[in-house]
Amino acid sequence: MNFNLETFKVSSKMNLIPEDGAYMLIIDSKLPIQSIVLQSKQNVDILKIKDNIAKIYAVKETQDPSIQMMAQLVIEGEGNQNVHNRIEIKIRTSEGQQGNINALIIPKDSQAC
């Protein structure tokens, strides 16, 4: 089986929002974003943002027992209204917990495997 996977540049940053006790994860992509899959070994809450362009689907069960949270964010809209290279995700975890969040960015018009 041959796969032609195109690489593309993605940058991210995490900003603390002290008044909400949360962080804003900002993801910028060279290619338009179709969806993002987030994974973490810690429980992470994805908070609602007014006028959010993504619909959040939480995955309750995973095959990997080390993953506590998995969610997919799908960009909503049709045609040219659905071209976004940047998304902001507000997240919160229990105080004192440390960990990592893995993000898989799926570009628009990609052939998902």
Image (spheres, rainbow, N blue to C red):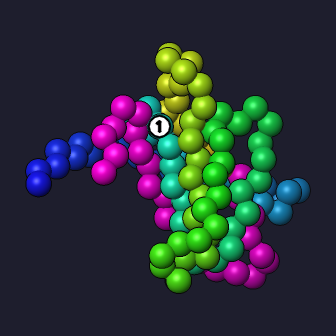
In x, y percent, where is residue 111? 30, 40
| Residue found farthest to the right | 19
**Residue 72 part of the magenta segment:** no
| Figure check: 85 above or below 68 | above
On screen, residue 53 versus residue 11, left or right, reads: right
**Residue 94 part of the magenta segment:** yes
| Residue found farthest to the top | 80
On screen, residue 4 versus residue 53, left or right, reads: left
On screen, residue 36 versus residue 109, left or right, reads: right
Numbered range of the magenta stretch: 90-113
Nearer to us in this view, 2 or 80: 2
Q: Amino acid at mark 1?
A: Ile
Q: Quadrant of residue 8?
A: top left
| Residue found farthest to the left | 2
Q: Residue at x 71, y 52 (%)?
A: 90
In x, y percent, where is residue 19? 88, 56
The quadrant of the picture occupied by the N terminus is bottom left
Q: Exactly how many numbered labels are in the figure?
A: 1
Residue where numbered disc 1 is placed: 33
Q: Residue at x 44, y 39 (%)?
A: 29
| Figure check: 9 above or below 82 | below
Nearer to us in this view, 70 or 18: 70
Q: Residue at x 48, y 79 (%)?
A: 64
The kind of secondary structure element at disc 1 is strand
* 10 Å crowding of disc 1: few (<14), some (14-19), many (20+): many
In x, y percent, where is residue 41? 57, 77
Q: Quadrant of residue 39?
A: bottom right
| Figure check: 56 above or below 20 | above
Nearer to us in this view, 88 or 75: 75
In x, y percent, where is residue 97? 70, 81
